[in-house]
Amino acid sequence: MKTLGVRHAGETTISGTDAVFEIGSLTKLLTGALLALLVEDGVVALDDPVARHLPVAPPVQGRPITLEDLATHRSGLPRVPRKLERWDRRDPYAQFTADRMPDVIARTAPKAEPGGRVAYSNYGYGLLGFALGHAASSTYGELIRTRLTDPLAMTRTGLDTPGLVQGHTFAGRPTPPWNLAALAGAGGLRSTASDVLRFLTSEPARASLAWFKAPGGHGLLMHDGGTGGFRSFALLKGETAVVALHDHARRINGAAFKALKTAEGSRPGRQA
């Protein structure tokens, strides 16, 4: 099952069933937006050491890691945290529960000094979401609900949204959902194409530090995502937003780029 959503010239088009998917690392876009909102409210600052908002301080290599380092993948932290037990490929992050995070944080050392080159880190974004929950005396899931999904009327987006379609491996075998536990800020959200488009066309989405600029520039922002049984991809260019969701762990980027090209070549439709 593939679903493609496009928002262009004020009109939304959904191709396929507007079902609930795991959106994987598109979650990072919302985590980055959440950071921007909490900075605006004065709850945190971008240059806050993340240790200020954690139960224990992470190991240091050079200067302390800041929230901005985490949000821009310049923390120097590894892509995944130091495991506490053997990896379960069917649900690899479930072992990182909130009560075990102090041990995880203390045992996962940076691989490089923060502030250097970009090195994509799921652990870094999971740690960011966990820290923001602590900073606001809340949880990541509750902050996402109160600061983003409720205000934007994203009624089918959350960590445990019901109605999730069956996910499949790359080879097409059914596989269970992922539980990212305390690292949910890296990729734990479920959503629909229509809900993702609501977010992508909002002001918080544009303030997110999680976006990557497409090669060649032209103002095109992008981000992809994946779990054991799903793939996702989002594009944002000006007022045009595209999201592609797939219930197989197969890349769907091409469909999103094609939809963007088609939208840009079409005449503006009437306002929705």
Image (cartoon, grey):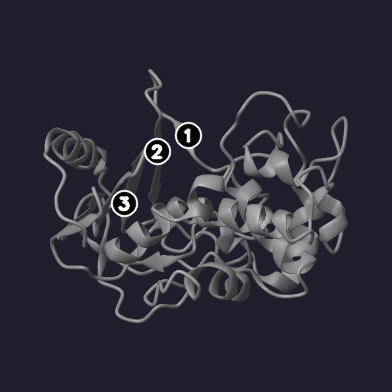
Dot 2 and dot 3 residues touching (CB under 8 Å):
no
Q: Residue at 41% across / 74% down in the picture?
A: 153
Point out the frontmost of discs 2 and 3: 2
Q: Residue 236 location, x and y as percent?
A: 36, 41
Residue 83 visible to the viewer: no
Q: Which marked residue is nearer to the observer: mark 3 or mark 1?
A: 1
Mark 2 element type? strand
List the residue tagged with mark 2.
222
Q: In the image, what residue type sits under mark 3? A: Arg
Q: Earlier in the sequence, mark 2 or mark 1?
A: 1
- Image-quadrant location for residue 156: bottom left
Q: Kindly identify the residue that appears in the image at 63 percent across and 66 percent down.
A: 182
Q: Quadrant of the C terminus?
A: bottom left
How far across and how far down the image is residue 132, in percent? 71, 61
Question: Which amino acid, mark 1?
Answer: Phe
Q: Say the numbered circle drawn on residue 223.
A: none
Instruction: Look at the numbered discs 2 and 1 and tell me whether their residues touch, using CB distance below 8 Å.
Output: yes
Mark 1, secondary structure of its residue: strand
Q: Residues within 10 Å of mark 2 (few under 14, many from 20)?
A: many
Residue 231 numbered tag: 3
When the figure is inspected, residue 32 is found, relative to residue 102, above or below; the finding is above
